[in-house]
Image: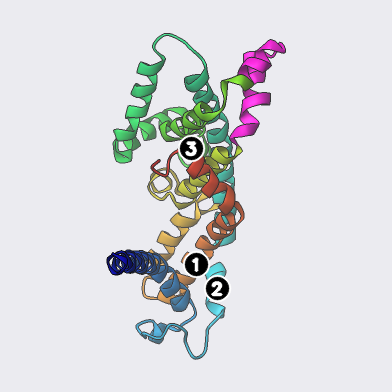
């Protein structure tokens, strides 16, 4: 009996080790697939034109001047500033209006609440390309084509995903907080703004980071709406640079790396709050 029990324990330990090794191998493979394009872009941005096909990760003589040439060929600084302004405005609007709508759907009781929420959530099934033409016609009717307003206003008043995210988080807050605030004489706005909203900072951080990344990386909408370089976004500038200098891959890769750096900085700063918000809101699959 002792020998049989020992064999079972050893088999359990072996299975656990094999499972752990398999998990780590899978994580390494997935991580490499995610990091390989970034490493290749950084490596290519430091090479010369003739070395772009070289398999070496780091060139013998890194050419840092490629990054300086980007700003000589393209007003990238202005485009980065434009993108940051657009992303900041849209992110602020998304955080405010999505939190407001999420609070209403989670805490306020009114007729047709669930039906309205499901209908609003159903807009997630509509492809973005379907709404481009109607939105363009609206922007043209308002006279906002080729203006910063076309980049800010359409995404300013919330989204179905952001509302869903905030609703799920508001529903996790204890009802005693709201009841105590009402007993103290707080209005509905005060309950939302002063009592419940401060507890949703992790979800707000998740929404802010996701919105910022979406606006920063957006290409289709700026391509449709913007023609002038002085109000163009960074992604639009990269594509225009590719059209003019499509054979100068080191310059193009240097531009891509410069555009990527602000996103890495933002995620590094908000990493803990972002992961905590994903876990608490249930978006991670709980």
Quadrant for the N terminus, please. bottom left
Up-down relation of residue 34 to residue 231 (above or below)? below
* Res. 86 visible in picture: no
Q: Is residue 202 above or below residue 263?
A: above
Kindly indicate whether the residue at mark 3 contacts the one at mark 2 (C-beta within 8 angstroms): no
The residues tagged by marks 2 and 3 sit, at their Cα atoms, a distance apart of: 40 Å
Q: Residues within 10 Å of mark 2 (few under 14, many from 20)?
A: some
Q: Which residues are magenta?
A: 178-200
Side (left or right) of 30 relative to 154: left
Would residue 198 be counted in the magenta stretch?
A: yes
Residue under numbered circle 3: 281
N-terminal label among 2 and 3: 2
For the residues bearing labels 1 and 3, Cβ distance under 8 angstroms: no
Position of the C terminus, as image quadrant, is top left
Q: Are marks 2 and 1 in contact (CB under 8 Å)?
A: yes
Look at the magenta stretch and give its main secondary structure: helix
Residue matched to label 1: 257
Tag on residue 67? Answer: 2
């Amino acid at each position: 009996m002792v020998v049989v029990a020992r064999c079972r324990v050893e088999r359990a330990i072996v299975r656990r080790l094999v499972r752990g090794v398999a998990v780590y191998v899978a994580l390494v493979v997935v991580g490499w697939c995610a990091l390989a394009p970034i490493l290749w872009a950084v490596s290519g941005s430091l090479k010369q034109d003739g070395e772009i096909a070289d398999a070496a990760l780091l060139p013998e003589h890194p050419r840092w001047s490629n990054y300086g040439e980007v700003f000589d060929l393209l007003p990238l600084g202005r485009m980065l500033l434009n993108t940051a302004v657009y992303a900041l405005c849209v992110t602020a609007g998304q955080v405010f209006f999505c939190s407001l709508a999420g609070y209403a759907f989670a805490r306020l009781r009114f007729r047709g609440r669930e039906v309205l929420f499901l209908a609003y959530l159903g807009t997630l099934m509509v492809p973005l390309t379907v709404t481009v033409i109607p939105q363009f016609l609206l922007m043209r009717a308002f006279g906002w084509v080729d203006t910063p307003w076309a980049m800010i206003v359409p995404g300013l008043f919330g989204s179905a995903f952001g509302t869903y995210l905030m609703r799920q988080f508001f529903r996790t807050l204890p009802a005693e907080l709201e009841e105590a605030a009402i007993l103290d004489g707080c209005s509905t706005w005060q309950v939302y703004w002063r009592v419940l909203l401060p507890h949703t900072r992790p979800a707000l951080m998740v929404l802010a980071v996701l919105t910022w990344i979406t606006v920063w990386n957006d290409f289709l909408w700026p391509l449709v709406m913007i023609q002038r370089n002085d109000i163009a976004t960074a992604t639009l500038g990269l594509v225009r640079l590719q059209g003019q200098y499509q054979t100068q891959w080191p310059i193009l890769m240097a531009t891509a790396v410069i555009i990527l750096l602000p996103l890495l900085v933002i995620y590094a700063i908000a990493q803990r709050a972002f992961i905590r918000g994903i876990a608490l809101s249930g978006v991670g699959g709980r």
